[in-house]
Every structure is written in C-alpha cells, then in structure tokens.
Image: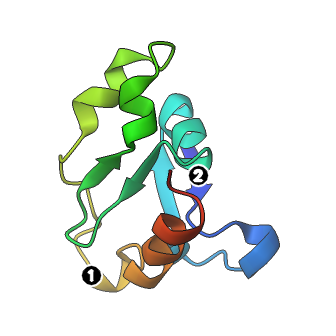
Amino acid sequence: MEAAHIKPWALSRDDFPTNGLALCRLCHWSFDEGLMSVGRNYEVLVSRQAKKDPNIPGPIMTFADRPIFRPSEDNYWPSQSNFAWHRESVYK
C-alpha cells in the first residue's frame, strides 16, 4: 500500500487524511495519471482512455463503479472537494 494525495501536496500542502487514499502501486500510478478517479458517491471511475488503451493492465477495469473503502468515522473520509478537483484537473 502507498499513501496517495488526492490533490498533490506540492499544490495543496495538505497532508490531512481527507486529502489521501491508501492505494496499491498500480492504482496510485493510475490515479496520478488520471486513468482513475472517484465519483460523487465514492465510486471508482475508470477513464474512457484507459478502457481504449490495450496496454493498460486489465485489473484496473475490475474496479470501475465499485465503492471505495472509507474509514468508519466520516470526518476522516476523503474530501469530495478534493475529488472534484481531481476529476476536473487530472482525470481523463
């Protein structure tokens, strides 16, 4: 597992849990490259670009539309405003 920032630390200086996700290396890279994001209902989004590219590893496709795991306390849930930024600025 790796700790991934939703909005990059270099832009946000935000190290709070609400700006983070625990991801495997492949998902972390895919998230940072905009091939994956998280929707308004905390579901995994897989970009159309990833679906078209035969070089993208198949396991990424299995996450599409599945809910992410969230902490039991909602004040630690990843911030929807950070996800909105990611969907607008990074997601392809």
Say which of 44 and 79 sits in front.
Answer: 44
Residue 1 seen from this side: no
Ranked by sequence position, the earlier of labels 1 and 2 is 2
Q: How many callouts does the rendering have? A: 2
Q: Amino acid at mark 1?
A: Asp
Residue drawn 53% across the image and 76% down it: 85
**In the rendered image, the vertical position of residue 10 relative to residue 31, given as above or below:** below
**In the rendered image, the vertical position of residue 15 relative to residue 47, given as above or below:** below
Mark 2 = which residue? 3
On the image, the x and y values in percent for residue 32 come to: 61, 48
On the image, the x and y values in percent for residue 16 come to: 58, 78
Image quadrant where residue 15 sits: bottom right
Disc 1 secondary structure class = helix
Residue drawn 29% across the image and 51% down it: 44
Q: Is residue 42 left or right of residue 56?
A: left
Residue 38 seen from this side: yes
Say which of 35 and 29 sits in front.
Answer: 35
**In the rendered image, the vertical position of residue 32 relative to residue 39, given as above or below:** above
On the image, the x and y values in percent for residue 49 come to: 45, 36
At label 1, counting other C-alpha atoms closer than 10 Å, the crowd grade (few under 14, some 14-19, many 20 or more) is few
How far is disc 1 from disc 2 in space, using C-alphas? 19 Å
Residue drawn 31% across the image and 50% down it: 45
Mark 1 = which residue? 74
At label 2, counting other C-alpha atoms closer than 10 Å, the crowd grade (few under 14, some 14-19, many 20 or more) is few
